[in-house]
Image (cartoon, rainbow, N blue to C red):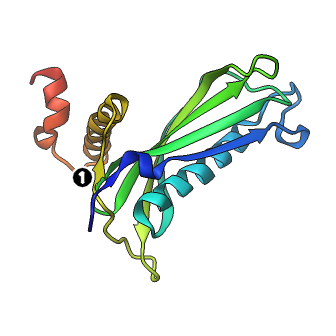
């Protein structure tokens, strides 16, 4: 299976926040944003694996700032690391100024997807090749996050979490 560049998994979606997606303060429901992020992250994971993918976990969500009714929101998702059958996907959320067109990042999330075969069993995915400086940083950080999750779940011994140990110089 041929390794793929991270850029091959890039998925971008732009939305307008509509009234049915807001709360009584005129701000986007967090659940609506989570659904948008899950959808675009699934597209990204599918582009990498070229297989059906399922959401395995939402590892991190940062609701950095509320998003107003009528806002133009762009979600950008890209696989940050691939393992045997799973992929970590980082979703960056940007809000566009409707007058100037300037964008600023408002939220971010990290999801994990698993590629599955026609019977729903996990299937191997291609390795990921980071190319840019940001992709390299995210690639390395993904392994630390994975090791931390495995240690916390009792699936890895802390002494075996070499990337985590390297942070703390233990």
Residue 95 image position (x, y, % from top left): 69, 26
Residue 27 image position (x, y, % from top left): 80, 28
User: In terms of secondary structure, where does tag 1 sit?
Assistant: loop
Q: In the shown orientation, is residue 31 left or right of residue 108?
A: right
Q: Quadrant of the N terminus?
A: bottom left
Residue 29 image position (x, y, % from top left): 76, 36
Q: Quadrant of residue 64?
A: top right
Residue sitting nearer the eye, 46 or 167: 46
Q: Quadrant of residue 65?
A: top right
Q: Is 126 drawn above or below residue 26 in the view shown?
A: below
Q: In the shown orientation, is residue 62 left or right of residue 168?
A: right
- Circle 1 is placed at which residue position? 155
Q: Is 90 drawn above or below residue 123 in the view shown?
A: above
Q: Quadrant of residue 68?
A: top right
Residue sitting nearer the eye, 40 or 148: 40
Identify which residue is drawn at 49% across, 61% down: 46
Image mark count: 1
């Amino acid at each position: 299976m041929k390794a793929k560049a991270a850029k091959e998994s890039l998925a971008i979606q732009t939305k307008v926040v509509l009234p049915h997606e807001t709360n009584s303060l005129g701000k986007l429901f967090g659940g609506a944003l989570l659904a948008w992020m899950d959808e675009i992250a699934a597209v990204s994971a599918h582009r990498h694996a070229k297989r059906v993918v399922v959401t395995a976990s939402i590892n991190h969500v940062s609701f950095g700032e509320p998003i107003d009714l009528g806002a133009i929101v762009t979600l950008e998702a890209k696989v940050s690391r691939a393992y045997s059958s799973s992929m970590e996907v980082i979703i960056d959320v940007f809000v566009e100024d409707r007058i100037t067109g300037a964008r600023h990042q408002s939220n971010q999330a990290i999801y994990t997807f698993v590629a599955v075969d026609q019977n729903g069993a996990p299937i191997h995915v291609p390795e990921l090749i980071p190319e840019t400086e940001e992709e390299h940083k995210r690639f390395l950080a993904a392994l630390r996050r994975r090791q931390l999750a495995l240690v916390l779940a009792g699936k890895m011994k802390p002494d075996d979490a070499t990337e985590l140990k390297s942070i703390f110089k233990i």
